[in-house]
């Protein structure tokens, strides 16, 4: 009799990863539950809504005990600091708007955690992500698709996964709706289904990302000048890390309150503000590309692009450049295309690939 | 299952288990403080247990107060001494080595907040105290010097009689946290002239949830816990008969000679030492200072000790990193840091703590599995 395949499930204590673990147990795998302890922060905080707090560890442990599987809470503070936190802070200081979940998926869940899984002979890590993977038998290429539940789809943040990582990933909830997941939780008697889904960045429970960056690198945030689109000085800003493209609130400007952040210029430490129509953009450059369901393109391609996790897919034309970057031209201009965020390309629910938004061009000017 | 984590908790001994059975059934529930028949039965059992401890520890039964464990005993000793009417007001300093258990260091720090002066003694890279540094630190404003008999992480033995004498020379009291000691070395409260001694039940084959404090001479200890006047006012609260009986039986069942070569642990320990000689890449801490046979503090440079614990656990072999925190995000051991290990080395350190009945075969299976684990983990690192 063949020994059962060992799979590590990344358990957060929430309903999704708990049900994912339960389903794999029912499917006969040798399941091992693990939680990455990544941020001690305020370990005494009772109202800690952050993911993977001590309370979450206890919840995950309880679920594991109920499922009869081993469970380990791993100390991965150092890895997290190196791969996620340092990058997060550095990006804000450089005038970009990061999405740390991308680094966490690439370097932690399917990086450092995958290593820890392999140490105990598990070749795969499963998570509660709503996404689907499929290996094309003809091309041998792993494809990534949005989860069946469009409202819960988490494929956006998984575009970073390499073919090798996709080969070692399992998403048991990909073909389910959230309602089905909750139904499973009820059937299995897993009481975690009364927890609301975590929305915020796991290590910034109060959503105050800027405050977090300030706490860690406040001495590197240097005030600079607000300037208008036509170069007029509009006063002092608190430091480029405090702003993101498209932002309207919290600018502290005199005059027209409809003004938004049009552009961040880290080279001159300026924040350009203007009216909404002056902030609309349609063309930008994407770097650090990762092609997933498709091999890297050599000719222009029409598809949909999401410029933020919560953005609706927008029709776009992708043009590959000789230097390996990509130019994206949106059919409709958009406000809030932020350097540092990910642009993920879709063909309906198929994730073609994605990359990091870098240069955003003013209207009418080619990259 | 190969259990090599006796310093965390030891299996309940046969003797303790049998002795406790009677007291875990209905009808054996009397409160030892009650004057009626049910109470008297319980009282008798408690006093027998107290004498079992006294016999083993070279002290008087009336000097023993049962507590909920060694942690409470430590708190009782430190706070009790601080609040004692017998403490001269000018004596407001407490001295403790840096490698003491948190159950000593934390109350010591709280005492500091309450107005006491705190001296933390450094240790050398072996984890040992320097007698000169000790006598220098023992000034005449010291009310208490506390030093453990056997270190829980490294197994290091302090020279308890000498330290007690040094304390008394300056008129200070001496407390010894002996939670780990009874299965590792002989203790003699009277012969060593120890003022306070903390004990743990579950480290020596008794049940969890019970400990004791030996408090010699008849001064008043003001207990941190307040309530009734049980145990001559030293420690309020109903004496838990079943747990006390178990602890007493465990002490009585300890072998008369802890160095008896016929004890399985002796061969197990010798075997492991021999194997380790063939692997100089595995660093053994505290080798050059007196320490417990059967306790190995091993540093694996470049390896994450947590990974090793998990690998071994997957093979039903149980060891520890010396820091019992199952919720992850652990800090490097303060004791190892005090010995001069880097935080990385501290996080690469395993604690293997055998018990008296650990066998040579178990030591062999442990070591073979450990080597396989090191290979597996190293191969994963190479790939990534």
Image (cartoon, coloured by chain):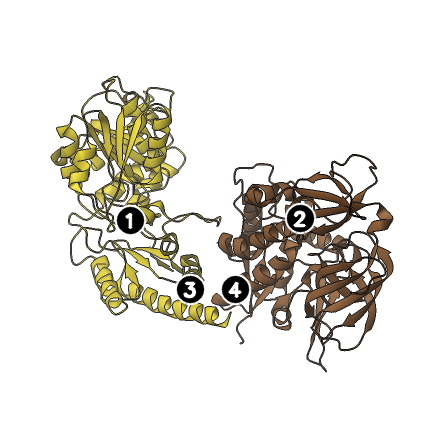
Horizontal and vertical percent for residue B325?
44, 47
Residues marked 3 and 2 touching at CB (< 8 Å): no
The numbered dot on residue B315 is 3
Residue B79's place in the image compared with B323, above or below, is above
Q: Colour of chain B?
A: yellow
- What crowding class fits label 2: few (fewer than 14 Cα within 10 Å), some (14-19), or many (20 or more)? some
* Mark 2 secondary-structure assignment: loop
- Write down the quadrant of residue A258 in the picture: top right
**Which residue is found at the position 23% from the left and 32% from the top?**
B145
Colour in which chain A is drawn: brown
- Mark 2–mark 4 Cα distance, whole angstroms, equals 44 Å
As displayed, is residue A197 above or below residue B265?
A: above
Front residue (pair A3, B87):
B87
Please tell me if label 1 and label 4 are on a single chain. Answer: no
User: Which residue is label 4 attached to?
Assistant: A117
Left or right: residue A118 compared with residue B255: right
Determine if residue B114 is in view: yes
Are circles 4 and 3 on residues that touch, CB within 8 Å? Answer: no
- Rounded to the nearest angstrom, the CA distance separating label 1 from label 4 is 32 Å
Output the chain of dot 1: B
The chain letter for the residue carrying disc 2 is A
Per the rendering, the mark at residue B339 is 1
x and y, in percent, of residue B203 in the image: 31, 45
User: Which residue bears the numbered disc 2?
Assistant: A269
Q: Which is more foreground, mark 3 or mark 2?
A: 2
């Amino acid at each position: 009799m063949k020994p059962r395949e060992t799979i590590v499930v990344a358990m957060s204590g929430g309903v999704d990863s708990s049900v994912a673990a339960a389903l794999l147990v029912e499917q006969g795998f040798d399941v091992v539950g693990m939680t990455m302890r990544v941020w001690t922060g305020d370990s005494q905080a009772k109202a800690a809504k952050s993911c993977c707090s001590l309370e979450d560890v206890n919840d995950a442990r309880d679920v594991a005990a109920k499922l009869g599987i081993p469970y380990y809470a791993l100390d991965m503070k150092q890895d997290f600091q190196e791969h996620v936190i340092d990058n997060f802070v550095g990006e804000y200081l450089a005038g970009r708007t990061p999405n740390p979940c991308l680094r966490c998926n690439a370097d932690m869940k399917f990086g450092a955690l995958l290593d820890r899984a392999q140490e105990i002979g598990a070749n795969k890590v499963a998570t509660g992500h709503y996404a689907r993977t499929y290996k094309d038998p003809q091309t041998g290429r792993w494809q990534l698709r949005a989860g069946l539940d469009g409202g819960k789809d988490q494929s956006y943040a998984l575009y970073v996964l390499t073919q090798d990582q996709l080969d070692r990933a399992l998403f048991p909830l990909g073909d389910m709706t959230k309602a089905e997941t909750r139904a499973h939780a009820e059937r299995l008697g897993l009481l975690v289904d009364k927890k609301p889904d975590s929305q915020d960045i796991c290590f910034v429970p109060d959503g105050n990302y800027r405050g977090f960056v300030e706490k860690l690198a406040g001495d590197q945030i240097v005030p600079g000048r607000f300037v208008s689109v036509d170069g007029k000085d509009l006063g002092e800003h608190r430091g480029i890390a405090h702003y993101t493209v498209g932002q309207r609130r919290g600018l502290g400007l005199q005059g027209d309150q409809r003004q938004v952040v049009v552009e961040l210029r880290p080279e001159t430490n300026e924040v350009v503000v203007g009216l909404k129509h002056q902030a609309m953009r349609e063309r930008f450059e994407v770097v650090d590309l990762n092609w997933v369901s498709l091999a890297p393109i050599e000719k222009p391609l029409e598809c949909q692009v999401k410029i933020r996790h919560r953005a609706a897919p927008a029709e776009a034309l992708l043009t590959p450049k000789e230097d390996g970057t990509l130019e994206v031209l949106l059919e409709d201009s958009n406000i809030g295309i932020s350097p540092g965020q990910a642009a993920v390309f879709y063909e309906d629910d198929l994730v073609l690939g994605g990359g990091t938004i870098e240069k955003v061009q003013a209207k009418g000017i080619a990259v | 299952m190969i259990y090599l984590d006796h310093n965390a908790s030891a299996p309940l001994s046969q003797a303790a288990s049998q002795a406790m059975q009677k007291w875990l059934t209905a009808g054996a529930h009397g409160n030892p403080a009650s004057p009626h028949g049910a109470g008297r039965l319980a009282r008798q059992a408690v006093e027998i247990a107290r004498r079992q401890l006294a016999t083993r520890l070279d002290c008087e039964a009336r000097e023993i107060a049962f507590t909920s464990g060694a942690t409470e005993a430590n708190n009782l000793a430190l706070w009790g001494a601080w609040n004692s009417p017998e403490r001269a007001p000018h004596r407001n300093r407490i001295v403790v080595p840096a490698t003491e258990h948190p159950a000593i260091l934390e109350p010591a720090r709280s005492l500091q907040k309450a107005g006491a002066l705190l001296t933390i003694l450094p240790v050398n890279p072996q984890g040992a105290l320097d007698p000169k540094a000790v006598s220098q630190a023992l000034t005449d404003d010291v009310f208490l010097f506390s030093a453990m008999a056997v270190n829980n992480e490294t197994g290091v033995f302090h020279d308890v009689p000498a330290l007690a004498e040094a304390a008394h020379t300056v008129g200070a009291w001496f407390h010894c946290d002996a939670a780990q000691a009874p299965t590792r070395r002989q203790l003699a409260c009277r012969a060593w002239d120890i003022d306070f001694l903390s004990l743990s039940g579950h480290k020596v084959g008794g049940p969890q949830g019970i400990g004791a404090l030996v408090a010699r001479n008849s001064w008043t200890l003001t207990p941190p816990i307040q309530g009734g006047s049980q145990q001559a006012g030293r420690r309020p609260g109903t004496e838990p008969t079943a747990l006390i009986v178990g602890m007493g039986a465990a002490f009585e069942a300890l072998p008369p000679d802890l160095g008896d070569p016929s004890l399985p642990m002796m061969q197990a320990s010798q075997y492991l030492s021999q194997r380790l000689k063939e692997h100089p890449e595995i660093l053994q801490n505290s080798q050059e200072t007196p320490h417990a046979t059967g306790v190995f503090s091993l540093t694996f440079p470049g390896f994450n000790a947590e990974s090793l614990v998990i690998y071994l656990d997957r093979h039903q072999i149980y060891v520890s990193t010396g820091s019992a925190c199952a919720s992850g995000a652990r800090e490097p051991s303060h004791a190892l840091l005090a010995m001069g290990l880097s935080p990385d080395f501290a996080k690469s350190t395993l604690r293997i703590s055998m018990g008296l009945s650990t066998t040579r075969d178990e030591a062999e299976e442990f070591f073979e599995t450990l080597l396989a684990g090191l290979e597996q983990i190293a191969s994963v690192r190479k790939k990534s």
